[in-house]
Image (spheres, rainbow, N blue to C red):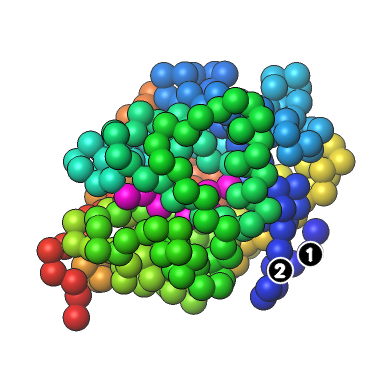
Amino acid sequence: MSTRQDGDSWDLASSVGATATMAAAARAMATRQDRSLIDDPFAEPLVRAVGIDLLTRLAAGEVAAGELVEQLWIDVAKIRTKFYDEYFIEATNAGITQVVILASGLDSRAYRLPWPTGTVVYELDQPQVVEFKTRTLAELGAEPTAARKAVAADLRDDWPAALRAAGFDPARQTAWSAEGLLGYLPPEGQDSLLDTITGLSAPGSRVATESKPNPRPGEEDSTKERLNRISERWREQSLDTDMTRLRYFGERNEAAPYLAERGWTLTTASIRDLFAVNGLPALEDDGMRLGDTLYVSGILGAKRPA
């Protein structure tokens, strides 16, 4: 698996796309463990349809996670899914009827959340990813629970134009999500994305994403070592992935203060806090500062920043 570069592409079995399939496999495992926190009935069949044998067997419970998938990551899937589910339910119950899920991957919220009548959910991702999920869920007989509009676009291209062409109206309040996305963008790409979201948002719009702290001296090396160990375990099972090469490292603007400076009023909760609130084992220092990562949701103020 090659290092990320400008203009690279992928499907759900390669590069960044494979991480979406891994995330869906984690959701399938998490669903089997605790439906009180997460209930994603589409995760396992979507992983099966992608066709990566090892991930299919993990998602179906045919292979024990064991050391291949640490319980930590399954627990993260539980609280992350619950956070975004609750965010969307709260936003739409408050009257927002326009939803945009960026880099939607194998996310199935358009099919499984109880969306209020009149809600439109825009799912934006690479063309082959959008086509695959739409076709696969149709073959499974799944019906969206909102007016779902699939938008085939690359976030490095003019995705706002594609979104508008699909019917998106920037004059209406929007609930945005950028879930598990920012670390796969270069620093300037992250800033551009958050600026674009802000520019397309009417006052009262909402946003949800993650805000990872910048590394202290030496922490980035620890993170790379941890990711390399994880990748090696996958390679031993004949799944060639390199988690380190898929991410962008180095200093970047932390998402929470960056959004706050642009007029968003934020609520934050650390992964460590969400583990505690949901009765999961306490997080210890893992060398990656995972517990310090914030889940962020916010509302755009009545006046846009100058």
Quick check: is 1 in the magenta stretch? no
Picture disc at residue 2: 1
Q: Image quarter for residue 52?
A: top right
Tell which of 141 and 203 is nearer to you. Answer: 141
Q: Position of residue 285 (x, y in %)?
A: 50, 44
Q: Position of residue 255 (x, y in %)?
A: 38, 63
Question: Mark 1 and 2 residues: CB-CB less than 8 Å, in contact?
Answer: yes
Q: Which residue is mark 2?
A: 8
Query: Hey, what amino acid is under mark 2?
Result: Asp
Crowd rating for badge 2 (residues with CA inside 10 Å; few <14, some 14–19, many 20+): few
Question: Helix, strand, or loop for circle 2?
Answer: loop
Horizontal relation, residue 148 to residue 245: left or right: left
Q: Identify the mark nearer the N-term, 1 or 2.
A: 1
Relative to 34, residue 285 above or below: below
Residue drawn at x 44%, y 74% as measured from the top left: 192
Horizontal relation, residue 16 to residue 279: left or right: right
Residue drawn at x 29%, y 34% as measured from the top left: 117
Horizontal relation, residue 79 to residue 227: left or right: left
Residue drawn at x 73%, y 34% as measured from the top left: 49
**In this rendering, which labeled residue sits more in front, label 1 or label 2?**
2
Quadrant of the drawing holding the N terminus: bottom right
